[in-house]
Image (spheres, rainbow, N blue to C red):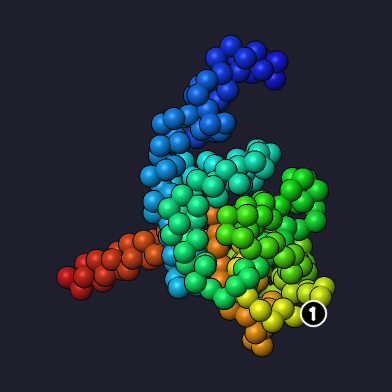
Amino acid sequence: MGVLRTVANFVFGMECIGCGTSSELLDPWLCPACAAELAREACAPKFPNDDVFCLFPMRTLTRRLVHALKYRNIPGLASYLVRHSSAVKHGMVAQELLMLAQPLHFVPVPLHRARYRERGYNQAELLAAALATATGGKVCRWLKRKTFVVSQTKLSKEEREMNVAGAFVADFPRGTPMRGSVIVVDDVFTTGATTSACLAAFGVDFPLPLKICTLIYDEPSTAAADYAADCRADWDGLRSRR
Ligand SMILES: [Zn+2]
């Protein structure tokens, strides 16, 4: 299968990570159609609140790309996605970040050691490095993971929050920094449980502003599900009164 794929790639060109079609015009990850779609998504960075910047919304294409970054051993996608995001292309996120006190300290959410060994890289660290290059900031490994955390994806919102609360500790090898701003970097922002646990690790007395930047904002579908459940409850209530 591996040999067949290699031969197919040689004859028909490599597969686009976005749509899976073979193309000789990859850039080097996306075909022209997917690259154009990514450029459109890059125009819509998401800001779930004043302290959180997300470079892309979660869409079919961006979901595939972040999945490839995490599970298909394509670390080069981190800088590719940051370079193609509004942080660099349209300057929107970069502008927000440059309004903060300088210098910018990009702090990646640490990966558990076992997962790092399995993956060979921490995608949050690669994203932090790409953001630091784009904005002139620095990568600072100021967070450590305290306990083993089971995969977040299989847990409910409440379970996720319980699972990561208190999972991180701040560690400053050269003493607490007194200048600039801290931006905690992760791949996906969903409920904010992981990044909140990271912010909590800095403690209430931490002197610098703390922000969050993630590659993707996965809008919680729970809001829609809750609304549907409320409507159903109203409807059932109406029916039982008849
Ligand atoms: Zn494509």
- State which quadrant residue 3 falls in: top right
Q: Residue at x 54, y 54 (%)?
A: 215
Q: Report the quarter where the C terminus lies.
A: bottom left
User: In the figure, is residue 1 to the left or right of 156?
Assistant: right
Residue 152 visible to the viewer: no
Quadrant (top left, top right, bottom left, bottom right) of the N terminus: top right
Q: Position of residue 62 (x, y in %)?
A: 49, 45
Residue 69, by quadrant, is top right
Which residue is painted at 76% across and 67% down in the image? Answer: 144
Q: Quadrant of residue 109?
A: bottom right
Kindly give the residue lying farthest to the left in the view shown: 242
Res. 125 in view: yes
Image location (x, y in percent) of residue 227: 33, 65
Question: Which residue is found at the position 45% from the left and 73% from the top?
Answer: 50
In front of the other: 219 or 10: 10
Q: Name above or below for residue 129 compared with residue 95.
A: above
Q: How many marks?
A: 1
SS at mark 1 in the image: loop
Crowd rating for badge 1 (residues with CA inside 10 Å; few <14, some 14–19, many 20+): few
Compare residues 151 and 64 and report the one nearer the observer.
64
Q: Which residue is mark 1?
A: 175
